[in-house]
Every structure is written in C-alpha cells, then in structure tokens.
Amino acid sequence: MLGNASFIVENQNYLNKFGHSPTGNGNEQLRIRTHLEYVENLIRNQTSTSSSSLLQLQALDYLNDYWNIGQFPQHDKYYQHRLPRFIDHNDIHCAVGYMISRSPAFEYVPKQINKKYEYSDVDQIKNNNLDKWMNLYQFSLNELSMIQPTYSFMCSKDQTNNRCLSGQCLTVGGDCLSLDGFEPSKRTRKPPQTGNTISLGAAV
C-alpha cells in the first residue's frame, strides 16, 4: 500500500535531501522536482518487476522525462492555499496529465479532463478515459494521487515591481512566493471559487 494522498510523501524526499521541510520562500521548481523524483522511485521500488507491465514502466519513464525537463503548471491567479492544476494557461500539463498525453491513443484525454477538473485532485476526477488509462497502465488511484503535486502562485517582478499584492507573499530574488506551506491542512479539496481570487495576469 503506497498511501492515499500526495501529502503523505510530498515532503519526505525534500526532508531527506536538504534536512528540512520545504517552506514558502524556497525554490518552487526544486520543490516539485524533488517530490516527483521521490514518488517515481517509490513506485518503481515498491512494484516488483514481474508484476509491472511494460506500459507502466514506460509511463514511469515519461514521468522521469517530465521532472527532468522541469516545466510545471503555475497559477495565474492568487489563491490562499496551494492547489493542483491539470493544465495551466500556458498549456503546461501536470505530471499525471503529461504521462497520459504521451500515451498512444490517450493524447486527447488530458484536455478533456481539464475542461471540468482543472483544479481538482486526481481522486475527484470522474472520467471514463482516465479509468481506462489507469487499468491499461496498471496505476492505482493512490499512486496517481501521490504523483500529483500542488502549486503556489508566483508573480513576476515586472508585474509587481518586486512588491507583492498579497500579505501572504514574500518577495525572494524578484519573485513573489506564497508563504503557504505543504501541510495537509493547507490543501483545499474543492476547486477555487471566482470570488476568492485576485487576477494578477500571467505568471512567468
């Protein structure tokens, strides 16, 4: 049993590597890369080679490509808590979406999912094609939930003149980083409501 939510493991490898949990004023890209690397290795190590399908191993190779490339979704609006995002405003897919998009005959599925579940946790998504992909590639819902990270809003310095518009942000190296942490209590289970956001334009 690998666990039932991303927050069970999303800090563990960061803590192992750097001796402390990630904080809001850390490097967002490093934080996500570290999480995805950890989960990839966890799934590979806890799944015996004999029970792994070639398709599952191929999908894990896609995941490896993804976090090495290092292009992750961002939020173009400020939210109080960290949230997942399936495909962002720059057409950048989340890790799960990327794995599916690289799978023959499933390339269209991520955008289909994104129309209804852009800010949803994986376990909230009801989509027959996602279920088909999971069965074919032998991934459990727990595994996909662990793969899926959350993202914090980052505002560019040319939009803010090195000054954040929210008191819950901190300017670090010219970027505005949310001070919200990765604690389970900070992760909302509902898609954001329009009234709870402040549009600040596209993030870099």
Image (cartoon, helix red, strand yellow):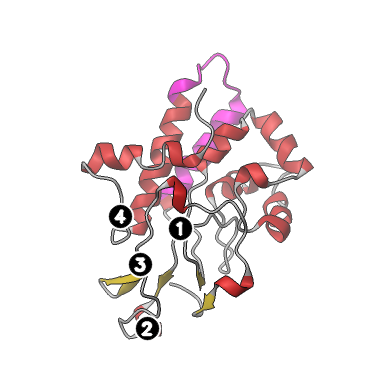
Residue 76 to residue 112: above or below: below
Tell me if mark 4 has few (under 14), some (14-19) or many (20+) residues whose alpha carbon lies within 10 angstroms of its own: some
Of pointers 4 and 1, the one earlier in the residue sequence:
4
Residue 123 place in picture, x, y as percent: 63, 42
Please, what is the three-letter code of the amino acid marked with disc 1?
Answer: Gln
Q: Is residue 58 magenta?
A: yes
148 or 91: which is nearer to us?
Answer: 148
Please, what is the three-letter code of the amino acid marked with disc 4?
Answer: Thr
Q: Which is in the foreground here, disc 2 or disc 1?
A: 2
Q: Is residue 55 left or right of residue 60?
A: right
Dot 2 falls on a residue whose secondary structure is helix
Residue under label 4: 23
Residue 146 to residue 190: above or below: above
Please, what is the three-letter code of the amino acid marked with disc 3?
Answer: Leu
Residue 160, numbered label? 2
Residue 32 place in picture, x, y as percent: 40, 50
CA distance for labels 4 and 1: 20 Å
